[in-house]
Every structure is written in structure tokens, then in C-alpha cells.
Image (cartoon, grey):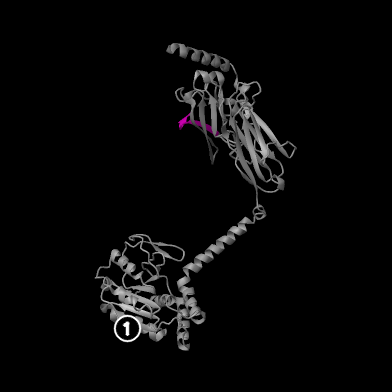
Amino acid sequence: MASSVITPFLILLFIKTVLTIHLSPHDNGLEYYCSLNKFENSHPGLQFTKEIVTTEYANFGSFKALHCCISGYRSIEWYKDDKAYPWPRAVSNFILYPESKNQTIYTHVAGPEDAGKFSCRARNDTNTLIADITLGIVGESSRDISSGYTGKPLLTYKPKSQIISFGSEARFYCEAYLGHVDLPDAKNTVTWLKGNTNESIPNDGRLRQTQVSREDNQIVGSYFHIDFTINSDYGLYRCKISNGADEEIIIPVYIYPQDDFLRNGSWTKALLFAIIILLVIVLVLSSYHRFFLPIFVILRNRFSHLEEKDGKIFDALICYNEKDSSLVFDKLSSVLQNKYGYEIKTLEISNINTEWSIELKSHTSTTRRIIIVMSSNLINNTWTAPNIISSFKKLSSLSTNTIVLCLEDLPNQLLLTKTFNNFILSRTTDDFNFDNINVLRWKHDSNDDIVKLFYWKLRYLMPAKKTTHNNDKNSTEMTTTSVTNVRETIESNNMSQKNINVYV
């Protein structure tokens, strides 16, 4: 039973092999393939001379050739599945076609062992070009050998959309493997269509289609040329590939116009201008604290709307632990009141983990800002990420804008992700919804420049305040000092979650 099935298969394969073995490669057009339909605009050196078909198909037992059309090379090497040529029959039946100067390999009888990835590697003295070609074998049964492939066209080269300047040349190529259909009127065809019409683009000299085929018309393709692109040429084109029966595929491509400034080379000026703008933006952002923050605070205090008619008495309520009282009264409160004219009220709180938040809420109706001087003294002497996060969660319930002044560096576990004008807490949070909280690192024992910068940031977060003549003079002097002397030596941890802004 098995021999009756195998025998017809072997007979058909033998007949086909005998017929094809006597066919010279010349009969399949191998010697002309790389010399026809080459790119018109070439340059000296190593280059492809026409489109490289990267996907190939062959009918089982049929003739098959693979091409790698290149100029300017000193050597071409072929590989199959990373194995260098020549190959044993167990790897591939393909051999070199010498007349093509190693640009073509072929076999009279393609078999399953030929399926795989082929690579051609062309070299000259300085460069290397590599093209990969994947070969698939179709019809691996006795029935398929006699009838050939009759399915949907298998695309071997897909055209790509292009950007073409007015007056320039355009070239597209479309190709597919179709096999043979045993019908009297069936014919493999490739047609180029404009837009959504079903009419083939006519050859009028400026526009032309060039039909090509190989391997006994089992593979068909078409070049579409535009010698001189005009405005009506831009838009959609479709490549229609049909076996003449009931199978076809359509591949859309577009021709896009190239802007005048790109065509004239002005894109280099545009790129240079964009780089300059980017550098200016980076400079402005990096110089924000040094130059623009003091100027902004002075202008805001002089010209912006004041919060004096909101019915509140104090500009800020400073909350602190008893152990930090000397620091609060000697440096913070006295400076804000005597130097900058803010109305300040102070409140001693023992521990942030107690119900102090209820007491703070009673002050929100009389104060515009709440300043929390936070240190380990305020959170049970445990300056850890969980305790700090818990503290911020409590502060988020306050309706008044809250400023947290950290006297100690934040723990390393609080990793920060910096965005454009915000700092987002990215670890050790449980999606807490913090609002109206701003965090400043207060290095009260640092040099004068850092201390002055700290007060500029603090005043930025405080309500706008009209200054007296003396204060204006002090502010101007501080601005000048900040612009000329503030150095980039600030090292601190910064943080915010949603509306938590961290300033360092």
C-alpha cells in the first residue's frame, strides 16, 4: 500500500528532474537578471543596483534562483543559516552561477532542505553590504508537484511609501509568487492603480509600468516609474497582484510631497535654530534658582494681588517641637517678621503622631500658610521613610497651603523622579493623596548664599507681601548677590506626590 503511494510521487519527481536538468540556467534568464532594471542614479562604491527581494518561494522540485545584485565589490560570499558556501546536499542544493560574478545562486530541483535564510555578504576594501533572503518551499506532496501552487499570491517584495520633491523621479517595485493555475484564461498579472480607481495607470512617457517575470512566470512583478513628479502625482497608489482566477492581493503606497524648506536645504537652519532654542530652555531651567527666582519674587510682591482681604490675620503659623524652639525664634520667625514684614504666629506641638492635626485645623481660618518645622524631634526621633510619609498624609488633610521645612536630609529610600516643574515621589508610597504641601530642605547652618537662596524659595511659597523702601533695598541687594554669587553646591533630597513640590 505504501509503495503504491510513493511510486507515482517518485515517477513524477524523476520526470520533472530529467526535464529540468537539461535546461541551461541561460533558459531561465539568470545571466540578464542583475543587468536589467537597475537603479538609474548610482554612485561609485559598494551599492545595491536594484531592489533586493528579501522573501522568496519555490515549488517543490522546481528550478529556483536567488539574486544579490551589487556593484563596486571585491568579493561576494553566500551563507545559508550562517553556514558558508559550498553546502552539502543535506543543507542545500544551491550552487553558484559563475557567469553572474557570484551575484546569483540556483538549483534545478528545490527541496525541503533548501528552505531557510540565505545571506549574501559583499565587501570591498572598506565596506560590507549584507542582504538576507528567506526561502520557503511550497507543495511538498505528489499532488502539489503535478498541479503547482494555486493559492493566494505570496508577496516577495513590498513597495514602501516615499517622500518625493516636486520635479524628482519616483520608482516603486511590487512582486509576488503566484505559481500556476490550470485554467485556460488564467494569467498572473501585476497592475498599478491610482487612488481608489480600478483602471491601470497608462504609459504616457512620463508615467510607465514595466512588467517583469521569472522562473516560468511563477513570480511576477512590476516597476512603476515617474520621470518628473508633478502635483497631481502625490497621493495614494495601489499595487494589484492577481492569478487571473479568484485570488488577488492589493498593496497601498503613498507619494508624499517634500516641503520646500527641506528641498532647499533649509532644514539645517531649522535644526540649528531648534538646538539653540533647546539650549536656551536648558539654561533658563538650570538658572531658575540663581537668577529668575529672586526677580520673580520681587515682581510678584510689587505687582500681584495680595491676600489681605481674605479675613485672615496671620501670614503664617509656624509649628515646631520644643527642642527646635531656639532655631525657630532666633532665625526663622524673626527673619520673616523683622526683615520681610510677615505677620507670624507660632505654635509648639509635642509630637506629630498625636492628634495635633485637629488643633491645626482650628488655625486654618486665621492663617494663610502653615509652616511645619520637621525634624526627628517631631516624629518620635525616628527619621524614617514610613514615619515621614505618615506625617505628610496627616498634613494633607489641612485646607491651608502647608510648607514643610525639613531640618534633616531625607532618607535614601525616598527616591525621586523629576519632571518638568514637579517632583513625584516614586517609592515607599501607598498612593497617598497629598495636596497643598511643599517641602523645603532647611540647612540653617550653611553658608550665606545657601541661606539666602532658602529664604527666596520660602518667600516664593509665602503670600505676596508689599515691602517697605528699606526692604526693597535689601531685596535688590539680595537679588544682585543671588545673580552673581549663588553657586551650584546645593545637595538635598527633594520630594512631592501629586501637588507636593520639593524645593532644594
Q: Position of residue 217 (x, y in %)?
A: 62, 25
Q: Is residue 81 magenta?
A: yes
Q: Visible in this render: residue 504?
A: no
Q: Is residue 232 left or right of residue 453?
A: right
Residue placed furthest toward the bottom: 469
Quarter location, residue 459:
bottom left
Quadrant showing the N terminus: top left
Q: Is residue 83 magenta?
A: yes
Foreground residue among 356 and 268:
356
Q: Position of residue 448 (x, y in %)?
A: 38, 78
Q: Is residue 378 left or right of residue 1?
A: left
Q: Disc 1 designates what residue?
A: 330
Quarter location, residue 412:
bottom left
Foreground residue among 63 and 105:
63
Q: Position of residue 250 (x, y in %)?
A: 61, 36
Label 1 is placed on what type of residue? Asp
Residue at the image point whose x is 62% and y is 59% from the top: 269
- Which range is magenta? 75-84
Q: How many marks?
A: 1
Quadrant showing the C terminus: bottom left
Q: Position of residue 308 (x, y in %)?
A: 45, 83
Quarter location, residue 379:
bottom left
Q: Main secondary structure of the magenta part?
A: strand
